[in-house]
């Protein structure tokens, strides 16, 4: 049962959640890609597999705003981490995690640019150079998706 597994990993007793909505109303990531901490708590309570397999919990920014406001003392980011652990135990590390682990194994530290490159599936440093040039061009010419920019500004404001 997912609720018990989450409790064992995270120490969070999700059964205590009574769906008051305080977490989702505090959450700056709510609504992005269907992300909703309150609904996910309910899905965990009901043992719905989609909550693990859909990986929507990865949208959690781990800002802990919901945790400080939850009247039941629950912490959704811990639940999200537990769900992530459950997914990884079932399926093994994904591409980003493999890139991260291989950096640690090879170098003893993480080079974020190399991880981003490996995770993106881009094949070479040439592609990285091209990507960076394109990104620079996009930012300088102002051709950044305005919806994304608005979202970033909203998060910075909040
Ligand atoms: S704030 Fe706490 S009790 Fe309320 S819905 Fe969110 S997790 Fe459940
Ligand atoms: S920790 Fe995650 S769920 Fe909680 S408010 Fe921040 S982004 Fe939302």
Image (spheres, rainbow, N blue to C red):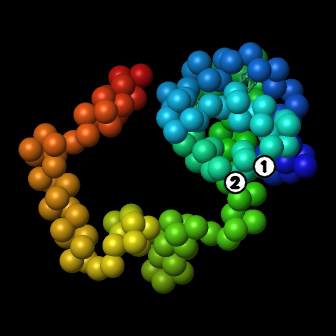
User: Residue 52 in the image: x percent, y percent?
Assistant: 72, 50
> Is 2 situated left or right of 107 in this image?
right
- Dot 1: what SS? loop
Q: Residue at x 80, y 43 (%)?
A: 48
Residue at position x 55%, y 73% in the image: 98
Q: Residue furthest toward the bottom? A: 106
Q: Which residue is mark 2?
A: 53
Q: Nearer the viewer, residue 139 or 112?
A: 139
In depth, the one of 57 and 68 nearer the eye is 57
Residue 86 to residue 158: above or below: below
Please identify the quarter of the rendering in which residue 66 is found.
top right
Image x and y of residue 88, in percent: 69, 63
Give ligand 1's quarter of the image: top right
Q: CA distance from mark 1 to mark 2?
A: 6 Å
Quadrant (top left, top right, bottom left, bottom right) of the C terminus: top left
Q: Residue 137, which numbered label?
A: none
Residue at the far left in the pictured view: 141
Label 1–label 2 contact, CB within 8 A: yes
Q: Classify residue 141 as left or right of residue 71.
A: left
Residue tagged by mark 1?
Answer: 49
Asked if 68 appears above or below 125 in the picture, the reply is above
Quadrant of the rendered structure where residue 74 is?
Answer: top right
144 lies above or below 137:
above
Q: Position of residue 151 (x, y in %)?
A: 36, 31
Q: Is residue 20 above or below residue 141?
A: above
Crowding at label 1, few (<14), some or many (≥20) Cα neighbours within 10 Å? few
């Amino acid at each position: 049962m997912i609720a018990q597994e989450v409790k064992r990993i995270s120490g969070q007793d999700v059964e205590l959640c009574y769906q008051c909505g305080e977490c989702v109303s505090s959450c700056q990531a709510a609504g992005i890609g269907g992300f909703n901490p309150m609904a996910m708590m309910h899905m965990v309570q009901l043992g719905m597999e989609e909550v693990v397999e859909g990986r929507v919990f990865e949208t959690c920014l781990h800002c802990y705003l919901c945790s400080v406001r939850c009247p039941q003392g629950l912490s959704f980011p811990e639940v999200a981490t537990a769900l992530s652990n459950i997914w990884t135990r079932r399926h093994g590390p994904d591409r980003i995690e493999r890139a991260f682990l291989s950096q640690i194994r090879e170098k003893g530290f993480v080079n974020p640019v190399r991880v981003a490159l490996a995770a993106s599936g881009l094949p070479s440093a040439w592609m990285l150079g091209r990507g960076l040039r394109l990104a620079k061009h996009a930012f300088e010419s102002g051709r950044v998706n305005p919806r994304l920019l608005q979202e970033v500004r909203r998060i910075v404001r909040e």
